[in-house]
């Protein structure tokens, strides 16, 4: 995070605050702003959250807000409902979900994680 004297905060994924490499080689970088972390993920064909990310964290999935840039992903909510999300589509899903890349192209997506303000 780079904060200026004017109060602006900016970040760039070329110089991320955090980088994760998943078991299958998929990656996610994130930049930290004052009120939100913005992730940029490139998920390889066959990537599945429960198999390639969840086992690394040891935690269940949390609320997730995202935007797909390219490729497609299927999201299954905690009730078993599924939806496919593709380029130009945004989504939000509650905790306890799973997600996986469909097709033979990587899914490139942004995700947004709000940071609670301390009052």
Image (spheres, rainbow, N blue to C red):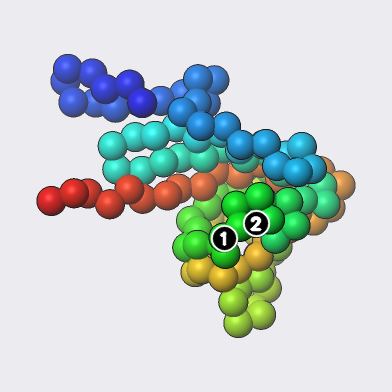
Classify mark 1: residues with Cα within 10 Å, few (<14), some (14-19) or many (20+): few
Left or right: where does residue 99 sit relative to residue 39?
right
- Of helix, strand and loop, which one carries label 1? loop
The residue furthest left is: 119
Left or right: where does residue 94 sit relative to residue 53?
left
User: Would residue 98 be visible to someone looking at this image?
Assistant: yes
Front-most of residues 1 and 69:
1
Residue located 57% across and 32% down the image: 19
Mark 2–mark 1 CB contact (< 8 Å): yes
- Of helix, strand and loop, which one carries label 2? helix
Percent across and percent down for residue 104 are 86, 47
Q: Sequence order check: which comes first, mark 2 or mark 1?
A: 2
Percent across and percent down for residue 7 are 18, 26
Residue located 17% across and 17% down the image: 5
> Residue 82's mark?
none
Residue located 75% across and 57% down the image: 51
Q: Which residue is mark 2?
A: 54
Percent across and percent down for residue 56 are 66, 50
Looking at the rendered image, the quarter that the N terminus falls into is top left
Classify mark 2: residues with Cα within 10 Å, few (<14), some (14-19) or many (20+): some
Left or right: where does residue 73 sit relative to residue 33?
right
The residue furthest front is: 58
Front-most of residues 70 and 60:
60
Q: Which residue is mark 1?
A: 59
Note whether 98 is above or below 30 in the view shown.
below
């Amino acid at each position: 995070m780079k904060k200026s004297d004017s109060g602006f905060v900016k970040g760039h994924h070329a110089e991320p605050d955090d980088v994760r490499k998943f078991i299958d080689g998929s990656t996610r970088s994130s930049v930290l702003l004052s009120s939100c972390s913005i992730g940029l993920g490139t998920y390889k064909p066959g990537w599945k959250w429960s198999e390639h990310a969840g086992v690394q964290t040891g935690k269940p999935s949390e609320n997730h807000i995202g935007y797909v840039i390219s490729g497609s992903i299927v999201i299954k909510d905690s009730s078993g409902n599924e939806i496919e999300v593709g380029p130009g589509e945004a989504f939000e899903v509650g905790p306890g979900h799973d997600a996986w890349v469909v097709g033979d192209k990587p899914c490139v997506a942004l995700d947004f994680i709000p940071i609670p303000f301390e009052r």
